[in-house]
Image (cartoon, rainbow, N blue to C red):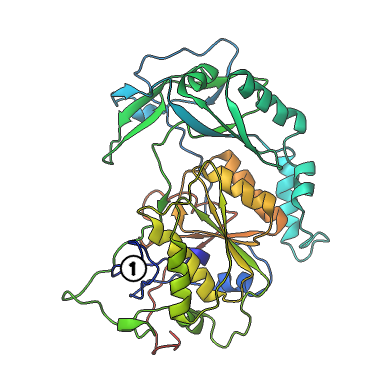
């Protein structure tokens, strides 16, 4: 969650079935290396494991258009889904939004630059780029960017937001136009592990070689963004166990977190901006009530809505509210919290990079990634923006690591259960 805080709700919230006044037992992740960035300390990047790619789900076994000779494959149909039987197809008159990703230039030089930026012995140590410098040195060329735009417009699609780093183009159009453009059929299947259907390309997705697109988000919804294991804590004997916080029933709120993780620290994040990656809206009144009840300053919130995001609170709004509340609790002097809400990760992450206002970025969601996502993480590094990703509540990774928690450009935070010596006390 915000700054890698994993929150576990043990009771119901107030204010429209949201999390605005949740003062119950929570599980908090380790914070030491996050606080270094939060309190104007030296910029650092954590290392994790491997880089995974976005799962572009394409299923065979469904009649569709064959690839045209001379086309380039952008996404292959996934072999492990061949045994699924399509229950239908998306209506050609239906509407879809897509985020098209383009490859950066000079990747080897970019990797070397990032290594130098974080090497105290280098002459380029902490000489971070501006978004304009990044686009000039490493972004796709304007010619390539316009080639993609011209291509989709000629196919009858509408171009939406354009990104100044030229890595992402947002487009929309009918299912029929998209299928024709990509020489595929978007079939509908019963999800093998969830109680819902999903759509995906039935055969390989192809485009002309002259169109420099490497990723397409939105063609399938097999894997959806999800909160990182937000779950109710076990209740012993039907009653919650007090944890000696200052909130009712011993729950933690507000300054309890600073007292536990940043005792005697005077810096409050004054003058800084935090950016939160979200995939759902929240109730603004909940944040105001939390600040009032916890005795916190009212920190301005700025919503950045992308991909036709509505900002309306849904079933996962407690995740969003808790992200905001924990950011403000740990850094009550923030200039503002910028809440980026989108349907596709690449759209929001790219906007965070091109805005370059929030130098601390946090996510408490697992979401699919692709090559373009990893490029944006590299842009964060080149510009001195640190992104913190929650590891989740599932203890050690014992199988597949949820993306993007395995990306080496992120700081992954998680792992402790908080018990303090008393209200406002240390842990």
Kindly state the secondary structure of the residue where label 1 is placed: loop
Assign the C terminus to one quadrant of the image: bottom left
Instruction: Sort mark 1 into few (<14), some (14-19) or many (20+) by Cα contacts within 10 Å.
Output: few
Tell me the residue that label 1 is attached to.
14
Judge by depth and name the residue closer to the eye, 108 or 333. 333
| Place of residue 55 in the rendered image (x, y in percent of width and height, measured from the top left) | 46, 37
Q: Identify the residue at image location x=41%, y=36%.
A: 221
* Residue sitting nearer the eye, 178 or 140: 178
Q: Is residue 255 left or right of residue 157?
A: left
Looking at this view, is 18 or 205 the one in front? 18
Q: Is residue 314 above or below residue 415?
A: above
The number of numbered badges drawn on the structure is 1
Relative side of 229 to 205, left or right? left
How far across and down, in percent of the image, does residue 65 sit? 45, 13
Taking the spot 34% from the left edge, 61% from the top edge, the residue there is: 16
Please tell me in which quadrant of the rendered image residue 85 appears. Answer: top left
Task: Give the percent coordinates (x, y) of residue 266.
Answer: 62, 85
In this rendering, is residue 57 above or below 63? below
Q: Does residue 404 sit above or below 103 in this rendering?
A: below
Q: Position of residue 249 (x, y in %)?
A: 30, 82
Q: Residue at the top extreme?
A: 69
Say if residue 208 shows up in the picture: no
Q: Mark yes or no: residue 351 visible.
A: yes
**Which is nearer the eye, 292 or 53?**
292
Residue that extends furthest to the left in the rendered view of this protein: 237
């Amino acid at each position: 969650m915000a700054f890698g805080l994993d929150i576990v709700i043990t009771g119901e919230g107030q204010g429209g079935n949201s999390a605005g006044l949740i003062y119950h037992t929570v599980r908090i992740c380790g914070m030491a290396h996050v606080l270094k960035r939060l309190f104007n300390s030296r910029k650092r990047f954590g290392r994790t494991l491997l880089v995974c790619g976005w799962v572009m789900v394409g299923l065979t076994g469904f009649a569709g258009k064959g690839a045209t000779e001379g086309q380039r494959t952008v996404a292959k149909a996934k072999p492990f889904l061949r045994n699924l039987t399509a229950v239908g197809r998306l209506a050609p008159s239906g509407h879809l939004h897509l985020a098209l990703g383009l490859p950066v230039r000079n990747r080897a030089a970019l990797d070397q630059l990032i290594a130098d930026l974080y090497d105290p012995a280098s002459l380029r140590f902490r000489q971070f780029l501006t978004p304009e410098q990044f686009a000039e040195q490493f972004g796709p060329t304007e010619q390539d960017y316009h080639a993609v735009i011209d291509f989709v417009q000629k196919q009858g699609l509408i171009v939406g937001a354009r990104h100044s780093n030229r890595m992402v183009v947002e487009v929309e159009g009918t299912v029929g136009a998209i299928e024709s453009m990509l020489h595929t059929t978007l079939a509908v299947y019963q999800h093998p592990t969830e109680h819902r259907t999903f759509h995906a390309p039935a055969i390989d997705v192809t485009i002309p070689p002259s169109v420099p697109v490497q990723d397409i988000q939105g063609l399938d919804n097999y894997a959806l963004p999800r909160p990182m294991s937000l779950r109710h804590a076990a209740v012993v004997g039907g009653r919650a166990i007090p944890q000696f916080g200052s909130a009712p029933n011993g729950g933690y709120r507000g300054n309890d977190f600073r007292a536990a993780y940043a005792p005697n620290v005077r810096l409050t994040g004054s003058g800084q901006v935090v950016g939160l990656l979200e995939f759902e809206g929240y109730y603004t009144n909940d944040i105001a009530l939390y600040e009032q009840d916890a005795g916190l300053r009212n920190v301005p919130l700025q919503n950045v809505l992308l991909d036709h995001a509505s900002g309306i609170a849904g079933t996962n709004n407690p995740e969003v509210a808790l992200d905001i509340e924990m950011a403000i609790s740990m850094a009550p002097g923030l200039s503002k919290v910028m809440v980026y809400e989108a349907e596709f990760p690449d759209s929001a992450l790219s906007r965070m990079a091109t805005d370059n206002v929030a130098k601390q970025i946090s996510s408490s969601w697992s979401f699919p990634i692709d090559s373009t996502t990893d490029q944006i993480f590299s842009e964060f590094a080149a510009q001195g923006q640190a992104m913190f990703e929650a590891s989740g509540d599932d203890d050690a990774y014992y199988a597949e690591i949820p993306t993007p928690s395995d990306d080496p450009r992120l700081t992954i935070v998680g792992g402790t259960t908080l018990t303090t010596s008393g209200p406002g006390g240390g842990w």
